[in-house]
Image: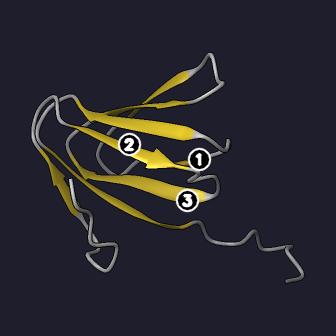
């Protein structure tokens, strides 16, 4: 799958999988539909529904699978308000 990171939203068909490598710190937002997300090295999986966001917290592979037709955006996570950078 080719991913154009300039596109703000990716469409995923039911069951379609998107694998991100070393995406730590990126924000995944379900614009429409529901996705299942798992991060390499983590025992916890996440279900992200419409309007919900997950910030990838680990290096390695992150797998995003559409549980139904979904649109997801992937981008930089906003810096915390108290971040001095």
Q: In which quarter of the image is residue 29?
A: bottom left
Q: Distance between the residues labelled 1 and 2?
A: 12 Å
Q: Is residue 36 left or right of residue 40?
A: left
Residue 5 visible here:
yes
CA–CA distance in space, label 2 to label 3: 13 Å
Query: Are the residues tagged 1 and 3 within 8 Å (C-beta)?
Result: yes
| Dot 2 alpha-carbon crowd within 10 angstroms: few under 14, some 14 to 19, many 20 or more | some
Q: Which of 17 and 69 is in front in this view?
A: 17
Q: Choose the circle earlier in sequence order: 1 or 2.
A: 2
Residue at point 17% right, 35% down? 16
Say whether disc 1 or disc 3 marks the residue closer to the N-terminus. 3
Disc on the earlier residue, 2 or 3: 2
Characterize the local packing of mark 3: few (<14), some (14-19) or many (20 or more) Cα atoms within 10 angstroms: some
The residue pinned by badge 3 equals: 26
Q: Residue at x 62, y 16 (%)?
A: 43
Q: Residue at x 32, y 39 (%)?
A: 49
Return the residue at label 2. Answer: 19
């Amino acid at each position: 799958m080719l991913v154009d990171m300039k596109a703000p939203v990716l469409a995923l068909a039911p069951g379609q999988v998107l694998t991100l490598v070393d995406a730590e710190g990126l924000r995944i937002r379900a614009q429409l539909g529901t996705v299942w997300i798992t991060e390499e090295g983590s025992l916890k999986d996440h279900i992200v529904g419409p309007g919900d966001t997950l910030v990838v917290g680990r290096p390695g592979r992150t797998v995003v699978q559409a549980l139904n037709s979904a649109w997801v955006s992937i981008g930089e996570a906003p810096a915390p308000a108290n971040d001095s950078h």
